[in-house]
Image (tube, grey):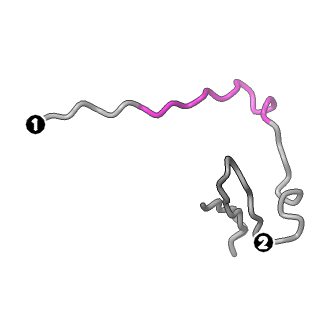
Amino acid sequence: MNTPPKPAPDASPLPASNAALPRVDSGQILQGANTVEIEHAGQRYLLRVTRENKLILTK
């Protein structure tokens, strides 16, 4: 039995230029910490810096 393909998720198009996007330095968000808690739409997320100096956002 063939199932129809799933529709692509709705995604808002990105602006033509990255200059139009707001930019925040990670240092302003982290303020010297390795992990910060972010609240969004009633949910809490953790933004943390890895040992490889990369950012990970988890719920």
Q: Which quarter of the figure is the N terminus placed in?
A: top left
- Classified by dominant secondary structure, the portion drawn in magenta counts as loop
Question: What's the residue at 70%, 26% (across, down)?
Answer: 15
Q: For the view shown, which residue lies furthest in the top direction? A: 16
How busy is the neighbourhood of tag 1: few (under 14 within 10 Å), some, or many (20 plus)? few
Q: Is residue 20 above or below residue 53?
A: above
- Quadrant in the picture for the C terminus: bottom right
Query: In the figure, is residue 35 to the left or right of 58?
Result: right
Q: Residue at x 83, y 42 (%)?
A: 23
Residue behind mark 1: 1
Based on the picture, tell me whether residue 10 belongs to the magenta stretch: yes
10 Å crowding of disc 2: few (<14), some (14-19), many (20+)? some
Please name the amino acid that badge 2 sits on: Asn
Q: Position of residue 32 (x, y in %)?
A: 88, 70
Q: Position of residue 8 (x, y in %)?
A: 42, 32
In the image as oriented, which residue stretches furthest toward the left?
1
25 to the left or right of 55: right
Which residue sits at x=65%, y=62%? 56
* Image marks 2 and 1: residues in contact by CB distance under 8 Å: no
26 to 8, vertically: above or below: below
Upstream in sequence: badge 2 or badge 1: 1
Residue for badge 2: 34
Nearer to us in this view, 54 or 39: 39
| Residue 34: image location, x then y, percent | 78, 72
**51 falls in the magenta region:** no
Q: Amino acid at mark 1?
A: Met
Q: Which residues are magenta?
A: 8-21
